[in-house]
Image (cartoon, rainbow, N blue to C red):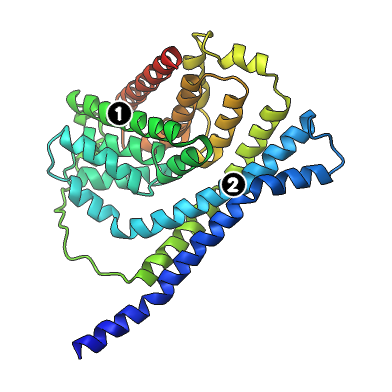
C-alpha cells in the first residue's frame, strides 16, 4: 500500500515538473531572438538605424521585452520561494536576536521577501510588536526594496554578474551598517507614542502547512500577476526615458554631467534620486542608458540606490510611525552610505 501511494505521489508531481522544464526552454528560446527581432523591426521601419530615432527605437524595442521577460521569470521563481516566507515567519526569525547578527539576517531576509514601500508601516509595526530591535528593523526595511529579487535579476541580466554582485554586496553593506548605527543611537523614544505603547506579541514559528509543487507554482503565477501587473507602467516609462537618453543625449554632455571628473555628480545624483518615485524595474533601464552615454558607475549606482532606498513616498508613509528626528537620522545615515559607495567606485573604477 505504501509503495502504491509513493508511485501515485510521483505521478502527481510529473506534470508540474514538466511544465517548469518546458517554461524554462521557451523562456530562453524567446530571450535569444530579442536582438535580431528588434533590429529587424527597426530595419523594416522608414527610419535610419544609425540616426537618433533609429537608435532610440531599437533600444526601446529590445529592452521592453527583455526587461519584462527578466522580471516575469524572476518574480515567478521568487514567488515560489516566497511561499516559504510569510511576514509572521520573518518576524519570528528576527525576534529575540542580538544586534549585529540580527542586522545581517534582516538584510539577507530583505532580499528574499517581496515587501515594498506600500507595506512599510504594517511591517514596521509588526516588527516592533514582536520585539525586533529598531536597528534590525531598519536593516530589513532598507534591504527589502533596494536589494530585492527584481533589482538583482535585472542587473545580472542587463549588466552581467560583476555589476550585479557588486550591487548586492554594496546594498547589503549599507543596509547592515545603517541599521547597526541606528540601533546604537538608541532612538526608540523617537517612535510615535502610539507605536511605543502598543502591546508586545509573542512570535511562534508553529507548524507550517506543507504545499505541493503545483501550489507553489500557483504562488509564482500570483506573484507575477500582482508585481508585474503593478510595475509594468513604470518599466515602460523607464525604458522610454532610457531610449530618449540613448538616442538623443550626446555622450560628451553626459560624461561632463555625471562622469568621474565631476566630483559633485555623486551628491547631485542622490539629491535628484530621493524625490523620485520609482522601483528597480523602472529605474534600471535609465541606469543602462546613462552608463552607455559615459556616466560614471559610482554616480549611477548612487542615483539608483537613492531612488529605491530613499524614495519620498516611503518617507511620507514612515512618518506615520516615526518622529521627524528619527526620519532625518534614517535618511542621513543611508544617504551617507550611498555617497560613500558612489565616491569609492568613481575613484577605483
Q: Using the image, tell me which numbered label, if any, was put on residue 173.
A: 1
Residue positioned 46% across, 65% down in the render: 21
Q: Is residue 219 left or right of residue 208?
A: right
* Mark 2 / mark 1, whichever is N-terminal: 2
Residue 118, position as x, y percentages in the image: 42, 45
Examine the rendering and report whether any part of residue 316 can be seen.
no
Of helix, strand and loop, which one carries label 2?
Answer: helix
Question: Separation of disc 2 and disc 1 at Cα?
Answer: 29 Å
Image height check: is 236 above or below 315?
A: below
Q: Is residue 96 above or below residue 333?
A: below
Residue 343 x %, y %: 42, 14
Discs 2/1, front? 2
Q: In this view of the protein, which residue sits in the foreground, 289 or 308?
A: 289
Q: Mark 2 points at which residue?
A: 66
When asked about the image quadrant of residue 176, the answer is top left
Question: Residue 75, position in %: x, y?
Answer: 45, 53
Which residue lies at the image location 19% right of the left edge and 87% below the top edge?
A: 2
Instruction: Give the residue at x 17% y 66%.
Output: 207
Quarter of image, res 259:
top right
Pick out the residue farthest to the bottom: 1
In this rendering, would 197 be left or right of 213?
A: left
Q: Could you classify mark 1 by the number of other residues whose Cα lies within 10 Å: few (under 14), some (14-19), or many (20 or more)?
A: some
Amino acid at each position: 500500500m505504501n509503495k502504491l501511494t509513493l508511485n501515485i505521489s510521483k505521478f502527481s508531481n510529473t506534470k508540474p515538473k514538466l511544465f517548469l522544464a518546458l517554461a524554462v526552454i521557451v523562456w530562453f528560446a524567446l530571450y535569444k531572438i530579442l536582438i535580431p527581432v528588434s533590429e529587424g523591426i527597426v530595419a523594416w521601419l522608414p527610419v535610419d538605424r544609425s540616426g537618433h530615432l533609429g537608435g532610440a527605437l531599437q533600444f526601446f524595442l529590445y529592452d521592453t521585452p527583455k526587461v519584462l521577460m527578466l522580471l516575469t521569470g524572476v518574480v515567478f521563481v521568487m514567488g515560489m520561494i516566497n511561499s516559504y516566507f510569510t511576514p509572521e515567519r520573518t518576524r519570528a526569525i528576527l525576534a529575540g536576536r542580538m544586534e549585529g547578527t540580527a542586522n545581517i539576517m534582516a538584510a539577507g531576509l530583505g532580499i528574499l521577501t517581496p515587501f515594498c514601500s506600500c507595506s512599510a508601516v504594517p511591517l514596521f509595526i509588526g516588527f516592533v510588536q514582536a520585539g525586533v530591535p529598531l536597528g534590525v528593523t531598519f536593516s530589513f526595511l532598507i534591504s527589502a526594496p533596494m536589494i530585492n529579487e527584481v533589482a538583482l535579476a535585472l542587473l545580472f541580466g542587463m549588466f552581467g554578474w560583476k555589476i550585479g554582485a557588486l550591487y548586492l554586496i554594496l546594498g547589503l553593506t549599507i543596509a547592515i551598517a545603517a541599521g547597526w548605527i541606528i540601533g546604537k543611537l538608541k532612538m526608540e523614544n523617537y517612535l510615535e507614542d502610539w507605536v511605543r505603547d502598543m502591546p508586545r506579541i509573542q512570535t511562534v514559528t508553529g507548524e507550517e502547512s506543507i504545499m505541493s509543487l503545483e501550489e507553489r507554482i500557483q504562488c509564482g503565477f500570483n506573484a507575477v500577476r500582482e508585481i508585474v501587473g503593478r510595475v509594468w507602467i513604470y518599466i515602460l516609462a523607464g525604458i522610454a526615458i532610457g531610449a530618449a537618453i540613448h538616442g538623443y543625449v550626446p555622450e560628451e554632455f553626459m560624461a561632463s554631467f555625471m562622469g568621474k571628473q565631476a566630483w559633485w555628480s555623486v551628491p547631485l545624483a542622490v539629491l535628484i534620486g530621493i524625490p523620485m518615485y520609482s522601483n528597480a524595474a523602472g529605474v534600471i533601464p535609465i541606469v543602462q542608458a546613462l552608463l552607455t552615454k559615459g556616466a560614471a558607475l559610482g554616480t549611477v549606482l548612487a542615483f539608483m540606490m537613492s531612488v529605491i532606498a530613499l524614495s519620498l513616498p516611503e518617507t511620507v508613509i514612515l512618518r506615520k510611525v516615526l518622529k521627524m528626528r528619527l526620519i532625518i537620522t534614517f535618511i542621513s545615515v543611508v544617504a551617507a552610505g550611498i555617497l560613500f559607495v558612489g565616491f569609492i567606485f568613481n575613484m577605483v573604477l
